């Protein structure tokens, strides 16, 4: 899927480190983190690709996610320990994910 444009986080590439896999990649504007990690060859479970099912929930090790899903509670968003990588991006230029 393509992330809807319209926020500052969409206009710049996002650096993502997949800590478990030991790879770094750039998520271009207009692409999702899910698309980028799958293009890099990682198997990541996902169903809706729309931020609704929670299947792609991923632990955030470093960085601040910009949540765009409909799954996490307000408290979970504030804590920022996980994110739905099919729709959410980042408020920071870099994220380290438990992938
Ligand atoms: S694939 Fe459903 S929330 Fe990400």
Image (spheres, rainbow, N blue to C red):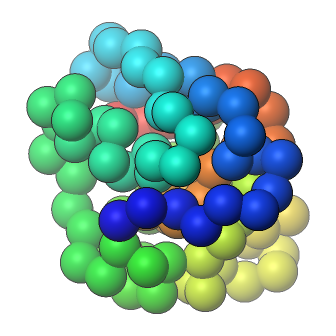
| Image height of 27 relative to 30, above or below | above
Q: How many marks?
A: 0
**Along the horizontal axis of the image, is 81 left or right of 85?**
right
- Residue at left 40%, top 25%? 18
Which of 12 and 51 lies nearest the eye of the viewer?
12
Give the image location of residue 42, x and y in percent: 18, 36
Which of 95 and 60 lies nearest the eye of the viewer?
95
**Along the horizontal axis of the image, is 44 left or right of 13?**
left
Which of 1 and 85 lies nearest the eye of the viewer?
1
| Image height of 38 relative to 53, above or below | above
| Image height of 4 relative to 69, above or below | above
Give residue 20's quadrant in the image. Answer: top left
| Image height of 99 relative to 81, above or below | above
Give the image location of residue 37, x and y in percent: 31, 37
- Note whether residue 82 is visible: no
- Residue at left 42%, top 14%? 24
Give the image location of residue 41, x and y in percent: 14, 31
The quarter of the image holding the C terminus is top left
- Residue at left 79%, top 33%? 92
- Note whether residue 74 is visible: yes
Give the image location of residue 14, x and y in percent: 61, 30
The quarter of the image holding the N terminus is bottom left
């Amino acid at each position: 899927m393509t992330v809807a444009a319209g926020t500052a986080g969409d206009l710049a590439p996002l650096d993502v480190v997949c800590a478990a896999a030991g790879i770094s990649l750039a998520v271009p504007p207009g692409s999702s983190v899910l698309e980028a990690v799958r293009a890099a060859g990682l198997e990541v479970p996902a169903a809706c690709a729309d931020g609704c099912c929670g299947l792609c929930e991923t632990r955030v090790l470093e960085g601040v996610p910009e949540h765009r899903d409909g799954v996490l509670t307000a408290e979970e968003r504030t804590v920022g320990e996980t994110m739905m990588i099919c729709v959410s991006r980042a408020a920071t230029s870099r994220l380290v994910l438990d992938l």
